Amino acid sequence: MNFAPNKSDLVTRLLTTPEQLRGVAPEWMDLWQRCPQAITFQRPQWLLPWIEAFSPRDTVAIEVRSQGTLVGLAPLLVYPKGTERVLAFMGGGVSDYLDILVDPQYTPQVIASIFAAVVEIPGWDVLELTDLPWNSALLRNSISAESVCEHDICSVLNLPDTTGELLHIFSKRQRANLRNAHSRMQRAGGAPVEIASSETLHDFLEDLFRLHAARWSSTGQPGVLHDEAVKVFHRASAPALVESGVLKLYRLRMGQRTLAVIYALFDRETVLCYLQGFDPESAYFSPGTVLMFAVMEDAVKQGIRKFDFLRGQEPYKLHWRAQGQYTYRIALPRSAFEGEFPSAAAA
């Protein structure tokens, strides 16, 4: 008979160096595979390059094991915020959803062990866990309902079963935009859609960086890729994600000119539309709209049912009829934990 073990069967340990985290990467990935709701932002292939690119000072992960098997992992760090020291998730700034990993067989026990172990982490005043997805186990097992609040909003589109139905879920205006854009491109000689391979990945990324910067520059804003560390992160993380089939970089080209690039994460039953860039001088062809529809078609063909535009309230998302979906925040002072849980056992 299957049963969830008592909390006393679990052992916790604090991992405080990048070397320790790299040392558990294979087990970390195995745990990720056992967590049906986990997404790319919790993978070691995402968070280990994040540590290398941004060099946070005070990282600490809480691992939880049962009979030697990794059954829980909370990747955290401590950073200054005003006069306080905040305990938060790793991956901030480049991740739209943040969460722990917990084997579904051990959920309440692992979460209790993690909450107990945070007291062992020195030098923090407030626990602030942001960008939790709606289905996070932490929301169902938080020690205080009053500590949970809405934090941000993502835009999510439900995809149909077939590509034939896809066009009809959009407004007449959007369907007309797509028809007109395709007609303009055909009259100009066509613009094929390409998908990056390991060999072409560098060129696709550089096109994305350039077009993303051009797009935001045209609005007088820097965009998320103005920070060189963000580019370093993506150059480091992309090869393994492409190799595993998670990352797909789509590119729309007209002759030798790149009109648009979309960085999409194909994550189980959802596509995360993470980054995009298009040539402002090619706006006549609506390349961003054409390429976005091509990514959606590809997703439907693969049986994917959700298309997540992630955070941000950009107007273009409304044209695709995406619906808002909140992320959540848990905030608790250190005093909420002291004396409430037994001390974490050291491995």
Image: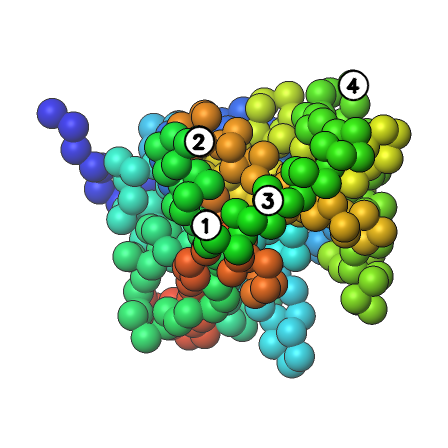
Dots 3 and 1: beta carbons under 8 Å?
A: yes
The residue closer to the viewer here, 296 or 17, is 296
Q: Name the amino acid, label 2.
A: Thr
Question: Looking at the image, which residue sits at the far right?
Answer: 256
Tell me the CA gap for discs 4 and 2. Answer: 30 Å
Mark 1 belongs to which amino acid?
Phe
Q: Amino acid at mark 3?
A: Leu
Q: Amino acid at mark 4?
A: Glu
Neighbours of disc 4 within 10 Å: few (<14), some (14-19), many (20+): few
Quarter the N terminus occupies = top left
Closest to the camera, between mark 4 and mark 3, is 3
CA distance for labels 2 and 1: 13 Å
| Sequence-first tag of 2 and 1 | 2
Q: Between marks 3 and 2, how big is the CA–CA gap?
A: 15 Å
Residue under label 4, please give it. Answer: 199
Q: Residue at coordinates 39% horizontally, 71% vertically from top-left?
A: 149
Q: Secondary structure at mark 1?
A: loop
| Residue that badge 1 annotates | 170
Is 164 in front, or is 257?
A: 164
- Residue at numbered disc 3: 178
* x and y, in percent, of residue 5 in the image: 22, 37
Q: Are marks 3 and 2 in contact (CB under 8 Å)?
A: no
Relative height, residue 240 to residue 41 (above, below): above
Query: Does residue 333 appear in this view?
Result: yes
In this figure, which residue is indicated by the disc labeled 2?
Answer: 163
Q: Image point 60% across, 38% down: which residue?
A: 264
N-term-proximal mark, 4 vs 3: 3
Disc 4 to disc 3, how far (Cα)?
31 Å
Residue at 59% in and 44% down: 178
Q: Cα distance, mark 1 to mark 4?
A: 36 Å
In this rendering, position of residue 113 left or right of residue 22: left
| Label 3 to label 1: alpha-carbon separation | 10 Å
